[in-house]
Amino acid sequence: MFSSIVVPVDLSEIDIAQPALDRAVALAAMTNASIHLVYVRSILPVTFMEYVPPYFDEEQQEDCEKRMKELVAKLPLTDKSKVTTAVRMGSVYNEVLAEAESAKADLIVVGSHRPAMSTYLLGSNATTIVRHAPCSVMVVRTPEKKN
């Protein structure tokens, strides 16, 4: 069914990515698919460059790669050798789509929060990924919190 699954994660909002990770792990277990986790770092505006230390980018990259490895370690998979990680820099949807092409993905599993007025007007990364993906996309919503 699926052989290569890409899962975009936001390391600052793991709670949004967790349901997508859980779904991807379940699908991979059923189909023996590989999982490719991708985190996209934002590009720092040029106007801030004079305020950051010289090795800022390298340190951020290393920190993100470490956090991705920690995330993989927590996944309930018996064979973690089929999980790869990538930390990219740029716009989220462009880099996720590039990772999907690179991994020859046949599925992208993306987490999404409940829509708010701002996302209706501006769109979201999940929306753009769905529109432009070279493969099937599964959007997994975070469960609503009950009061």
Image: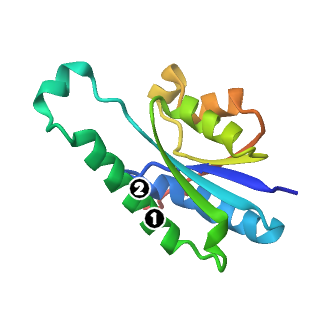
Label total for image: 2
- Which residue is labeled 1 in the image? 69
- The image's colouring method is rainbow
| Residue type marked 2 | Glu
Give the SS element for disc 1. Answer: helix
| Name of the residue lying farthest toward the right | 1
How many C-alpha atoms fall within 10 Å of the one at disc 2: few (<14), some, or many (≥20)? some
Q: Residue at x 11, y 30 (%)?
A: 51
- In the image, residue 106 sits, relative to residue 31, either above or below, namely above
Q: Which mark is residue 65?
A: 2
- In the image, residue 135 sits, relative to residue 110, either above or below, namely above
**Image position, residue 111 (x, y; %):** 57, 49
In the rendered structure, the answer to whether residue 7 lies left or right of residue 69 reads: right
**Image position, residue 127 (x, y; %):** 62, 31
Q: Residue at x 70, y 27 (%)?
A: 131
Q: Nearer the viewer, residue 123 or 107?
A: 107
Distance, label 2 to label 1, CA atoms, is 6 Å
Q: Which mark is residue 4?
A: none
Q: Residue at x 19, y 19 (%)?
A: 47
In the rendered structure, the answer to whether residue 53 lies left or right of residue 132 reads: left
Q: Nearer the viewer, residue 62 or 17?
A: 62
| Residue type marked 1 | Lys
| Name of the residue lying farthest toward the left | 51
Give the SS element for disc 2. Answer: helix
